[in-house]
Structures are given as structure tokens and as C-alpha cells.
Image: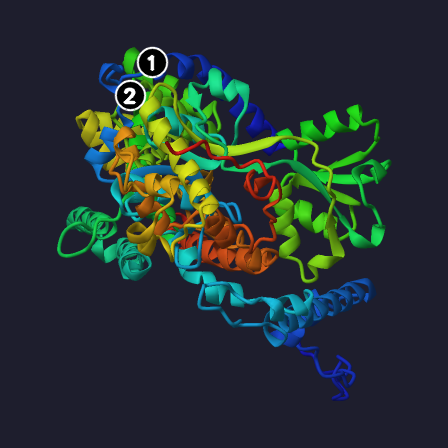
């Protein structure tokens, strides 16, 4: 009850804050030339350089994406993206400060300049892109809502969930998606609404619900934590689109470009077979034209972004390419590449425009 | 008056030989009187003993006999918790505490610098102990506080004396809880006295201001104040100017605690008989002398229990800062069990956290009841 009231209050506050958010820090659309951009927040890169580190807003704790380990060091997919960005800007992945942000304060933290970038698995939606004064330069991870059931139920698709009880968290898009899907697919399910993730999981394990629904990445993390993960199946049906990616302030195209192309660079590196172990050698021996441009040997691409030409060498050498980051953080929690595979090789959605 | 009849036999019959008297003192008597007075009392006692023993036995076997204390951790830092999972709940997995205790206590503070927050915690505890002793209640104590709090700031931030600088967002765990609670109450208490006096002032502007402050702050939940401090407040600041997140939360807590404590203090002021005020005025004391020497010492003594009640409440309320992404003790504990390998071992972590909170709150409560007894000695008959 109190949580719901809290949520309602947060929503109220956010609603009250929205006009302010939309007006205060979002400047007029910045012209293409950085020099002519409004002074206010258009020079994120200069501010980061002057400060000597990148400030990255991360989630307060989400397995695989951002979470402090036993020694208090931040680890995860979203965290590594910020490290890569720091490597691109400074050539040093350690020049980044991680600020834990909750779902409620994340956008204000970005708007007020408390953080330079949000890398905390935020879903890219139209309203966030426009009325919140944010920009989503790219999608680093394509997620979607799915279902997990016990293998013993012999359910193979979500359509068979007719009449099933489904554990779901309240007050999230997850709950709305479930209701939307249930109506659209004409599958009547009985939602069991439980506030906390942990309680949801234990209710599902104890058999209180037939199925548990949340983003597939979350399901995989829960499944991998079980004693016998094989007793649980994540159904192939995905009932919502959750493109997750970093968010930056609207109006600083130069910084957004750097964010976008750092991600693309990591994809291109995977495409070209460059990784943290072979990139140093490749700098000297690489002959393929696109790889040469990516590594800054020809083409002056780094300078066009306002960075050093060796920017991608630094990223790949210190953080790795996209698949290394994925395997380091998301494979251990049981996630497959799936739709996050390269479009060119695995038929996934990850696709880097040409480095030219 | 003679009790002896003519024939020499005593009038009063010699007492019948009686059974040995039932023990009237000692534990046996106490048990007989309180636990086994009649048959239903005996039945309840036996049932309770059965339940307590049963609970204690299963708790001991869960917490100690079947518990797993250490699990192997791979060089990559991934723990192998199969030993814990194999228990299936019959034993505690204290390995989560063994592995994560430094994270729970100190959060994301740089690992090799953990000695700094450790000293900070010890300094806080030392400060509490010294402040609690009446023989140190002199004005020099204020200097000690200023000195120690400065030292704590230096230790936490670093940047001098060869200690690397640690930005605030990396602080976490117990030091955060102690900082928020200590600074919060240390500043809120004087503030609350001023507000309570102001609320009883005869000057309308001051009175209105204090009433407005108290009612405004009391009318909203702490969580909304924290939201205001962390979500709305930065938007009013000029671009590029950012006040530290922890400081904003700290100010919100001070303002909130101040309003509540002010009402407690006001209760003490109102409980004093009018005669005390009039007598002080009759002596020709100024307002501040009257308040400082006559009114406050008596009023505060009256409100020790509700004051400590509020203190304990605020000590625990500091955990609400999790909503704005500050890793206090509770949040650090919650975050420790997000790692997939450790998911599902929340009970062990929460028991540990509960014990830490309990130690601080129980110490506060015991100390206050001692203080209360001592201060109110003159009232006892």
C-alpha cells in the first residue's frame, strides 16, 4: 500500500516536474556546427575533458547490466559501455565515475547535469525521446518481455497460458504489457501482483504462479540462479519491444555522435574480428581498408568526432568488442546473443553503419 | 491476661504439625506463582516451552549446525554457491556474509582504502560513547565533536596526506547510515529547540514562521522531501552547479527531523507548570537566561522517552535514501544479493543487517532509560 502510494506520489512529482524538465535545460535544437551551439549544455565533451572524467549514471543494481561486485567495483554490460566511452574520449577506461541512479531520479540526474550519460537499461520510447528532452543515440541491447514456466508444465508457447496464474511486478510497463497482450491475444490469464522481484521469484518457485513475466534478460538471470536451471523454460514468445540503450541530453549532437559511434565501433570490431587480444598487433599489420579506418590508420575518423584517431584502438584494447562485452557480462547470466547478434553474420538486429 | 489455665494446660491448643512452608522466595516460588498457578496456566506454560524449544532447536540447526560458512570463489570473482543451494533451506548460507561483508559495510568505497571508512565507523562509535558519559559533559565536548567530524570528513574524502580522493558517490554502507543519522540529529536537535521556542513565542511573525515550517514539513512524508531534494531542487539551480547528492539528502533529513523533534520539545515546554515561568520572570531573569537555566533543563528531562523514540526512528529512516540512489547500509545489503550466484540468500543478509541496526537502536534505548532514571531521581519516592 505504502509502495503504491509512493509510486503514485513519484508519478505526481514527475508529472509536476515534466514541464520544468521540458523547458529548463533543453535548449533550442543545436545547429550542426558545435561552435555555434548554445553554450549551456552543448559542450558535454569539453566539460568532460575539463573535469578529467566521464560521469555515468548506472542502475543501482541489475545482474549482468550494472552491479557492484564483492569488492565494490562496478561490473556489467551498461558499465562496460561507459568504460568504453571513457576509453574513446581519454584513452583510459578507468576515467569514469559511476553514479547509481534509481528509476525515479534517473532523468533528472541527466537533465541537471549530475551525470553526462545514463547507461542504465532505459527503454527508448517516443515520449522519453521528445518530452523529457533526452536523446537515445543508439540501442545497445534489444530486450523484450517474456514468460518463464516450469518445464514440468510442458508449455511451449505463451498461447497455452490460458487460465494460468502469472507473477508480475506492479507499477511497471511489465504489468501494462501483460494486460495489453492478454487482451490482444485473447488469452485470459490471472496476474498475481507482487511488489518485489525477489518475492516474485520465490512465489514462482514455490508454485504460487504458473509463470513469471518480466524482461527476458531478467528471466535469464533468475533462471541461471536456480539450482537446476533446466527445470525452467523461457518461452520463445516476446510480448513487448524494449530497446535498451544509453541516453544523453537533447541538444548536444556532438556528444551523442560519440556515444553512437562508440557502440557502432564495437560492433564493427566484432564484424572485422578485432578483439582485445589481437587489436594491438592489428594496428601494425591490418590491411583491410575498413579495419584501417576503424583503427585510425587512415581516414581521420576519430578527429571528425573530436577525438583522437586511435579512439577505437583504445576501446577495443581495454574494453573489447561488442561480443567480448556481451560474453563477459550477459552470457554468465544465461543470455543468448539471439536478436542482439550481428545482422551481417548472425541475422540479429545489431548493425553498424559503414566506417567511412 | 494469663494464657495458662488453672490446671496448667495452655488454653491455646498446640499447633497441628504442619507441612514445611511452600517456598515463598527464589526462582522455584516465582515459577510456581507465575507459570504454574493453576491448570490452564500450567498448560500454557508447557505449550510455550515446547514451542520455544522447538523454534530454538530448529534455529540453531539452521543458523549454526547446518550452515555453510565459506564457499569457493573463482579467480574471476564468481562464487560457486552450489554447496549453499544444496542445503535447500535447512541451513543458513553465511558464506554470503563472508564473501560480501566488506561490500555491505562499506559499499562501493575503493577496496584497498576500506581502512578509512572502518576508522570512521570506530570514530563515530567512540564519539557516541564519550558523549554519553556525563563526566565529559563540558563545553569542550563541542570542540571534540567539531574535531572528530572534521577528521571523519578528511578520512572519507581524502585527497590530502597521501590518501587518494574518493568522490561522494563511492561512499556507502555503514558510514553513510552513521553520517546521515549523526549529522541529521546533531543539527536537527538545536534547530528543533529554536523552533519549539519560536512556536511559543509572543512575536507573531516568528510564531507564524515556526508553525508554517513544522506543519509544512510534517505534512509531507520524508520520502517526498528526499524526492524534492534530489529531483526538483537541482532543476532550480543554475546549470553546472551541482550540490552534492548526499548533502541534499542530509539537509532534507535535518529539516524533517527538526520539525518532528520540535513538536516533542514543545510538548515538554507545555508540560511545565506555569509557575516555573512566572517564578523565573519574578527573579528578573532575561528571556534567554530563563529559558536556558529554568525552562529547558526541566522540559527536556520530561521528554527523554519521546526524544529517543524519534532518534531511533530517524536512525532507521535514513535507509530511505535508497530511493535517490545512495548506498546506505540497507541498500548495500540488498545490492549484495543481486549477483546471480547469491540470489535467494536474502534472509542471511537481512538477519545480519537487523543485528547491526539492533545494536545501535538498543544501545540508544538502554542509554536513554538509564538517563531518564538518573534525571528523574528526585521524583521517585
Spot occupied by residue A212 in the image (x, y as percentages of width and height): 72, 43
What chain does badge 2 belong to?
A
Spot occupied by residue B98 in the image (x, y as percentages of width and height): 47, 67
What chain does badge 1 belong to?
A
Q: Circle 2 is placed at which residue position?
A: A42
Residue A110, quarter of the rendered image: top left
> Where's the N terminus of chain B, which quadrant?
bottom right
Q: Is residue A91 left or right of residue B359?
A: left
| Number of numbered labels in the structure image | 2
Residue sitting at x 30%, y 56%: B117
Q: Which mark is residue B350?
A: none
Q: Which mark is residue A27?
A: 1
Residue sitting at x 79%, y 53%: A151
Q: Are marks 2 and 1 in contact (CB under 8 Å)?
A: yes
In this rendering, does residue B269 appear at all?
no
Q: Is residue B198 left or right of residue A260?
A: left
Spot occupied by residue B56 in the image (x, y as percentages of width and height): 66, 69
Q: Is residue A176 left or right of residue A81?
A: right
Q: Secondary structure at mark 2?
A: loop
Q: Earlier in the sequence, mark 2 or mark 1?
A: 1
Residue furthest out toward the left:
B161
Amino acid at each position: 500500500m505504502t509502495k503504491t502510494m509512493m509510486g503514485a506520489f513519484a508519478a505526481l512529482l514527475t508529472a509536476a516536474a515534466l514541464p520544468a524538465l521540458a523547458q529548463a535545460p533543453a535548449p533550442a535544437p543545436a545547429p550542426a556546427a558545435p561552435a555555434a551551439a548554445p553554450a549551456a549544455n552543448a559542450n558535454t565533451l569539453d566539460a568532460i575533458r575539463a573535469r578529467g572524467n566521464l560521469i555515468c549514471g548506472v542502475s543501482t543494481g541489475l545482474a549482468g547490466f550494472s552491479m557492484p561486485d564483492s569488492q565494490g567495483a562496478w561490473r556489467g554490460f551498461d558499465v562496460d559501455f561507459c568504460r568504453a566511452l571513457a576509453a574513446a574520449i581519454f584513452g583510459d577506461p578507468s576515467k569514469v565515475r559511476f553514479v547509481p541512479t534509481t528509476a525515479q531520479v534517473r532523468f533528472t540526474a541527466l537533465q541537471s547535469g549530475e551525470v553526462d550519460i545514463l547507461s542504465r537499461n532505459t527503454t527508448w520510447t517516443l515520449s522519453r525521446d521528445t518530452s523529457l528532452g533526452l536523446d537515445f543515440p543508439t540501442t545497445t541491447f534489444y530486450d523484450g518481455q517474456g514468460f518463464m514456466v516450469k518445464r514440468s508444465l510442458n508449455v511451449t508457447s505463451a498461447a497455452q497460458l490460458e487460465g494460468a496464474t502469472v507473477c508480475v511486478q506492479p507499477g511497471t510497463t511489465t504489468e501494462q504489457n501483460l494486460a495489453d497482450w492478454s487482451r490482444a491475444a485473447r488469452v485470459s490469464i490471472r496476474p498475481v501482483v507482487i511488489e518485489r522481484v525477489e518475492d516474485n521469484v520465490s512465489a514462482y518457485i514455490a508454485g504460487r504462479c504458473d509463470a513469471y513475466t518480466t524482461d527476458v534478460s531478467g528471466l535469464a538471470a533468475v533462471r541461471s540462479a536456480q539450482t537446476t536451471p533446466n527445470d525452467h523454460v523461457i518461452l520463445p514468445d516476446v510480448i513487448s519491444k524494449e530497446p535498451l540503450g544509453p541516453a544523453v541530453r537533447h541538444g548536444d549532437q556532438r556528444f551523442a555522435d560519440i556515444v553512437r559511434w562508440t557502440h557502432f565501433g564495437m560492433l564493427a570490431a566484432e564484424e572485422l574480428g578485432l578483439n582485445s587480444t589481437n587489436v594491438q598487433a592489428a594496428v601494425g599489420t591490418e590491411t583491410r581498408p575498413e579495419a584501417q579506418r576503424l583503427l585510425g590508420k587512415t581516414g581521420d575518423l576519430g578527429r571528425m568526432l573530436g577525438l583522437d584517431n586511435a579512439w577505437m584502438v583504445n576501446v577495443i584494447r581495454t574494453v573489447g568488442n561488442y561480443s567480448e562485452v556481451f560474453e563477459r557480462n550477459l552470457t554468465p547470466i544465461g543470455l543468448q546473443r539471439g536478436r542482439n547478434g550481428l545482422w551481417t553474420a548472425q541475422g540479429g538486429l545489431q548493425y553498424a553503419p559503414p566506417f567511412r | 491476661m494469663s494464657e495458662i489455665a488453672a490446671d496448667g494446660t495452655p488454653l491455646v491448643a498446640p499447633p497441628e504439625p504442619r507441612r514445611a512452608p511452600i517456598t515463598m522466595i527464589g526462582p522455584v516460588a516465582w515459577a510456581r506463582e507465575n507459570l504454574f498457578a493453576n491448570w490452564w496456566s500450567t498448560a500454557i506454560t508447557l505449550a510455550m516451552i515446547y514451542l520455544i524449544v522447538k523454534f530454538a532447536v530448529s534455529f540453531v540447526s539452521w543458523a549454526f549446525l547446518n550452515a555453510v560458512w565459506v564457499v569457493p570463489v573463482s579467480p574471476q570473482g564468481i562464487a560457486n554457491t552450489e554447496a549453499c543451494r544444496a542445503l535447500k533451506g535447512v541451513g543458513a548460507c553465511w558464506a554470503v556474509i563472508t564473501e560480501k561483508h566488506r561490500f555491505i559495510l562499506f559499499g562501493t568505497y575503493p577496496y584497498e582504502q576500506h581502512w578509512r571508512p572502518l576508522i570512521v565507523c570506530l570514530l563515530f562509535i567512540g564519539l557516541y560513547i564519550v558523549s554519553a558519559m556525563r563526566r565529559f559533559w563540558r563545553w569542550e565536548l563541542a570542540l571534540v565533536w567539531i574535531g572528530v567530524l572534521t577528521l571523519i570528513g578528511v578520512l572519507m574524502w581524502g585527497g590530502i596526506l597521501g590518501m587518494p580522493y574518493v568522490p561522494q558517490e563511492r561512499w556507502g554502507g555503514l558510514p553513510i547510515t552513521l553520517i546521515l543519522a549523526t549529522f541529521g540529529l546533531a543539527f536537527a536537535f538545536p534547530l528543533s529547540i529554536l523552533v519549539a521556542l519560536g512556536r511559543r513565542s509572543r512575536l507573531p511573525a516568528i510564531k507564524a514562521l515556526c508553525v508554517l515550517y513544522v506543519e509544512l514539513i510534517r505534512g509531507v512524508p520524508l520520502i517526498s522531501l528526499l524526492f524534492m531534494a534530489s529531483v526538483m531542487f537541482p532543476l532550480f539551480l543554475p546549470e553546472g552547479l551541482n550540490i552534492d547528492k548526499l548533502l541534499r539528502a542530509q539537509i532534507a533529513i535535518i529539516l524533517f527531523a527538526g520539525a518532528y523533534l520540535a513538536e516533542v520539545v514543545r510538548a515538554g515546554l507545555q508540560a511545565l507548570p506555569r509557575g516555573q515561568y512566572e517564578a523565573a520572570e519574578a527573579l528578573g531573569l532575561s528571556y534567554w537566561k530563563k529559558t536556558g537555566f529554568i525552562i529547558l533543563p526541566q522540559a527536556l528531562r520530561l521528554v527523554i522517552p519521546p526524544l529517543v523514540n524519534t532518534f531511533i526512528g530517524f536512525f532507521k529512516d535514513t535507509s530511505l535514501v535508497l530511493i535517490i540512489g545512495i548506498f546506505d547500509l540497507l541498500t548495500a545489503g540488498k545490492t549484495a544479493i543481486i549477483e546471480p550466484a547469491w540470489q535467494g540468500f536474502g534472509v542471511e543478509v537481512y538477519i545480519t543487517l537487523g543485528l547491526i541496526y539492533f545494536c545501535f537502536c538498543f544501545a540508544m534505548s538502554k542509554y536513554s532509560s538509564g538517563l531518564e532514571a538518573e534525571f528523574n531521581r528526585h521524583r521517585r519516592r
